[in-house]
Structure formats: C-alpha cells, structure tokens
Image (spheres, helix red, strand yellow):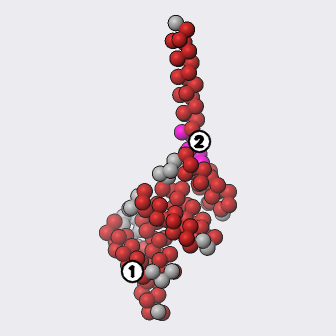
Amino acid sequence: MRNFFLTIFVSVILFSFSNTIVNAKNSYFDEGKKLFDNKNYKDSKFYFEKDIVFNPKSENSYLYLAKIFKKEGNDSLEENNLNTTLLLNPKNEEAIYLLTLLNIKNSNFSNAKELIATLTSICEKMCSSKSELQSKLDSSLKSE
C-alpha cells in the first residue's frame, strides 16, 4: 500500500514538472518575440536561444535569430540560421525570401535564382515578393 502512494506521489510530481517545462518552452519564444518587436534584440536573442535549447526544432526561433543577425550585419550567422530554418521547414517563405536577399547581397546569383524559383513554386503568402526579388537580382546582374 505504501508503494502505491509513493508511486502516485512521484507521478503527480513528474506530471506537474513536465507541465512546467512545456509552458516554459512556449514562453521563451513568446518573450523573445515581444522583445524583438520592441527592438530589444540583445535580450530577444537570449530567449530565442533558450527556446532552441528546449526545442531544437523551433524553426521560428532560428528565423528570428537570423533576423537579429541581419540587423547586426553578421552575414554568416544569418545564413546559418536561415539554412537551419529551411532544413526544418523547406517551405518557409520568409526564410527563402531573406536567404535570397542575402545571396543577392553576396553576389551569389545562381543560388538567388534557385531560391526565387523555389519561392515561385511554393508561395502562398509572399507571392508578391517574387517580383521584388527578381528586380533586385536583375539590377545586381546589370551592375556587374
């Protein structure tokens, strides 16, 4: 009988602890997003990184980290985070858009063309961005 109560007690403790972890996972991204929206990039980066520790498949945290690195001018970390976002979700239109802009900036025109073609084939929300990207690519090609 004593073992039964001990098992119940341990189960209740573990259940409440796991519930706290699940809530913490959600709040790290949400808190990071609030800070990002308020242009507090340093603190938001901390929360997005913390979210990734608890949820390594958090494509949105990787995407927001890429946006932060874009603002900081760190192209290599921006690219790493965008590639990770696309690895987790190859149809993330915003990541494709940002990676295309980065490739145009870095004169990697063949990759930019491929990404524009990918965006064209999958676009649902950002279809209008295709023409913007194409014109940026065309003007970059002319200036070469």
Horizontal relation, residue 90 to residue 20: left or right:
left
Amino acid on which disc 1 is placed: Ser
- Res 144 label: none
**Residue 131 visible to an observer of this rendering:** no
Q: Position of residue 124 (x, y in %)?
A: 36, 64
Q: Where is residue 57 in the image (x, y as percent from the top left)?
A: 47, 51
Q: Real-space Cα distance between discs 1 and 2? A: 42 Å
Q: Is residue 14 above or below residue 89?
A: above
State the SS at label 2.
Answer: helix
Residue segment shown in magenta = 22-28
**Which residue shows up at 37% across the image and 70% down it?**
119
Q: How crowded is mark 1: few (under 14 residues within 10 Å), some or many (20 or more)?
A: few
**Which residue shows up at 43% across the image and 56% down it?**
88
Horizontal relation, residue 124 to residue 143: left or right:
left
Task: Verify whether residue 27 appears in magenta.
Answer: yes
N-term mark: 1 or 2: 2
Identity of the residue furthest to the left in this view = 121
In terms of secondary structure, what is the magenta stretch mainly?
helix
Residue pointed to by mark 2 = 24
**Which residue shows up at 53% across the image and 22% down it?**
11
Identity of the residue furthest to the top in this view = 1
Nearest to the observer: residue 38 or residue 56: 56
Q: Residues within 10 Å of mark 2 (few under 14, many from 20)?
A: some
Q: Say if mark 1 contacts mark 2, CB within 8 Å.
A: no
Residue pointed to by mark 1 = 110
Specify the quadrant of the image occupied by residue 108: bottom left
